[in-house]
Amino acid sequence: MATQPNDENQFEKRPVSTRKVHANRQNALKSTGPTTARGKAYSQRNAIKHGLFVSPLTDFRALDENPQEYEDLLNGLWDQYQPVGKAEQVEVEHIALCYWRLKRAWRHENAMNLVARRDFVRKELAEQKEYCEERDKEEKAVIVQLQSAKKEIEDTGEISQELKQRIFALMPEVEQVLVAFDKYAQERIEEQGLMKRFQKLSPQTRSEILAMSAVSNTIGGLEQLSTYRWTNVTEIAIGQHAIPNREALERLLRYETTIERSLGRAQDRLERLQRCRLGERVSPSLSLRLTQ
């Protein structure tokens, strides 16, 4: 009766012939990997996707980040530093992570400012709306009186004292504005070389021209005040929230300081590794920074 082979004999490896070993070695010599500089660079970066500091794809998606942007950052730093060996590669990855965290800090700061403008600016502008509308109402009342003043100038050549008193009672600063615009009109006439022709006019005509110019310019200025006021109020409300509040800002600055310190140390370690690899002398100051 034939004996059944036991498990040990059944799975025993057969010896490889010398001819087969020689053929395998010859085939291996033909597979030299990438030969171009670009191919070697891509091959060298194959381990980046599984690097020590690279976050999983789910982490990027959870923070609504584009993993391709991180890969571009890492590859750009890789091209810049040209790391050789695992130690240098790890430091380049660490540097990329620090820059990415600084970008996250900026995102956080920007988000906080957007929330502040959305929640607080809207409230502040609503509070200022009543003030702006009240000022608009006062200025419109003055404009109506100034329109009457223009009609008086056309009819009588001057503004009556009674009308002046009503205007100045509504807005006292208009008196100084009219004087300033009167002076401005005279300066413009002189600058344009029209003073000789202007002097030939009768005193009453000259007075009418200057008065009409002053009133018209004052009306134009008052009509633009509403737009300027609202723009100014809006800029002030938004400007107050251009940076985070004190508590959030202190927390953000501590975070950024920690990242920048870690970035500086990673750059120093990488510089030391590369200098040592190239046989260059490492300065004592660099070695001291690396131990801090």
Image (tube, rainbow, N blue to C red):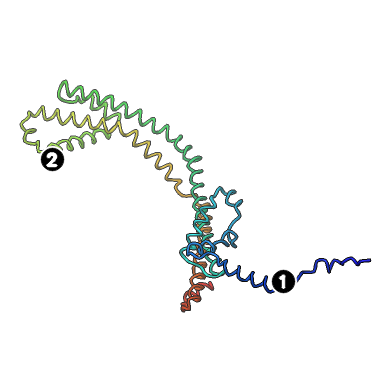
- Is 260 drawn above or below residue 195 in the view shown? below
Q: Nearer the viewer, residue 152 or 44?
A: 44
Residue 229 drawn above or below residue 246: above
Which amino acid type is shown beneath numbered disc 2? Answer: Glu
Local packing at callout 2 (Cα closer than 10 Å; few below 14, some 14-19, many 20+) is few
Q: Residue 70, labelled with which disc?
A: none
Q: Is residue 87 above or below residue 48?
A: below
Residue 142's place in the image compared with 246, above or below, is above
Query: Residue 59, image x and y in percent?
Result: 60, 52
As rendered, which of 4 and 32 lies closer to the eye? 4
Q: Amino acid at mark 1?
A: Val
| 135 relative to 280 in the view: left or right | left
Q: Residues within 10 Å of mark 1 (few under 14, many from 20)?
A: few
Q: Residue at x 15, y 31 (%)?
A: 210
User: What residue does disc 2 label?
Assistant: 191
Q: Where residue 84 appears, x then y in whole percent?
A: 52, 70
Circle 1 is placed at which residue position?
Answer: 16
Q: Quadrant of the N terminus?
A: bottom right
